[in-house]
Amino acid sequence: MHDLLSEKIELRKKQGSQYFSVAEISKPDEKEAKLGTFYLLLDYEAQEKNATKIFEIVLHIFEEEYYGRKEEIYLRNSETISSLFEEALAKLNKAFETLVNEGYLEDPKKVNACVAIIKENEIHLASIGNIKTFLIRDDRMLELTQYEEAKKGQDIRSFSNVISGTVKTGDILLLTTKEILNYFSNEKIKR
């Protein structure tokens, strides 16, 4: 199992800033817990109301498309956490397109986000933009995600690369913005 250090962390540079950064960890009920715990890190330079709307939509999609299908999933055990996660990401990508069309995402290239599901020792994560995801195991630190520019002619980045694997007791998973490296070296992070 995993230990949670925080349920929600919200950061802003200063009052009225256009910079919004938030981390969320779900608190699944007993049935939802069978599908794992959802983690989100969103970093977006935008008006707060737009950034908040994006954050709420991401949470809603995972509540409805991932956890919301729990009854149906118990009836069909062939459904895997991985396929549920990928289906939720597909809905999230469509929602991002809609947000661009409705004007909530003024500049989709400024969205940096990571979503992850951890169920027991199984982990699935995907990111867009410049989010750093590290796995620290046995005093070694491995960066799991790489910054990916939007493809030429593509205005909207999408959650397309899913990383899946296993974690073990004692592992540390760190989801962070690139800014952490301005304050801490890799060696300090490992400690």
Image (spheres, rainbow, N blue to C red):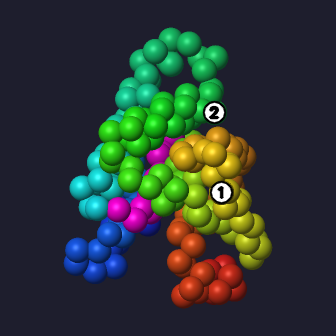
**Dot 2, how many residues are within 10 Å of its Cα: few (below 14), some (14-19), or many (20+)?**
some
Q: In the depicted view, which residue is nearer to us: 29 or 66? A: 66
* Residue appearing at x 50%, y 11% in the figure: 75
* Residue appearing at x 69%, y 86% in the figure: 187
Q: Name the front one of labels 1 and 2.
A: 1
Give the magenta range: 35-46
- In this rendering, the count of numbered labels is 2
Q: Secondary structure at mark 2?
A: helix
* Residue appearing at x 54%, y 79% in the figure: 180
Based on the picture, tell me whether residue 43 belongs to the magenta stretch: yes
**x, y (%) of residue 122?**
65, 43
Q: Is residue 59 above or below residue 88?
A: below
Q: Secondary structure at mark 1?
A: loop
Q: Amino acid at mark 1?
A: Glu
Q: In the depicted view, which residue is nearer to us: 161 or 125? A: 161
Left/right of residue 173 with respect to residue 22 in the rendered view? right
Q: Pointer 1: what residue?
A: 149
Residue 178, by quadrant, is: bottom right
**x, y (%) of residue 119?**
57, 42
Left/right of residue 190 with respect to residue 12 in the rendered view? right
User: Do the CB atoms of the residues marked 1 and 2 lie less than 8 Å apart?
Assistant: no
**Which label is found at residue 82?**
2
